[in-house]
Amino acid sequence: MLTDTYTIAVDFDGTIVEDEFPRIGKPIIFAFDTLKKLQENGHRLILWTYRDGKRLQEAVDFCRQHGITFYAVNRSFPEEEYDTKYSRKINADYFIDDRNIGGLMSWGEIYQLLVADGSLPSKTNKKRKKGWFSF
């Protein structure tokens, strides 16, 4: 089990729900259960999606109706301001997205990895990456 708390960015279409964009698809089995468990364990969840405007609000409302309120939406923290004309990377420890190399794990596997089996490294034990020119 993770003892550290993490910031986890989660995609919506194809990850939390079946990809029916621009409509909202059916919830993917165990997605909301796993997200709730992550929040119960103190992890910050960020909704990280291509959606914007009305479509984004529909996704946020859909998640709220299923018991998930995100720490932030399409930004690293709630107060962050940025130019929405440009895509940008969210500052998160982990990303859950159906476009991962190898595809999306099942939410049961994600639960095992993040919550149950403790196979992820502790934040305090993570080695710092060396830069290109670090010696």
Image (cartoon, rainbow, N blue to C red):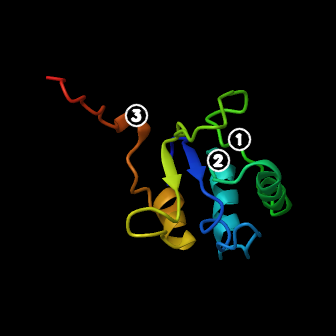
Residue pointed to by mark 2: 45
Q: Which of 33 and 22 is in front in this view?
A: 22
What is the crowding at mark 1: few (fewer than 14 residues within 10 Å), some, or many (at least 20)?
Answer: some
Question: Marks 1/2: CA distance?
Answer: 6 Å
Please state, as top left, top right, bottom left or bottom right, where the C terminus lies in the image: top left
Look at the numbered discs 3 and 1 and tell me whether their residues touch, using CB distance below 8 Å. no
Looking at the image, which is closer to me, 68 or 95? 95
Amino acid at the residue labelled 2: Leu
> What is the x, y in percent for residue 66?
81, 63
The residue to which callout 3 is attached is 124
Residue topped by disc 1: 71
- Asked whether, in this view, residue 69 is left or right of residue 92, the answer is right
Q: Are marks 1 and 2 in contact (CB under 8 Å)?
A: yes
The image quadrant of residue 118 is: bottom left
Closer to the eye: label 3 or 2: 2
- Specify few, some or many for label 3: CA neighbours under 10 Å numbering under 14, 14-19, or 20 or more: few
Numbered disc 1: secondary structure: loop
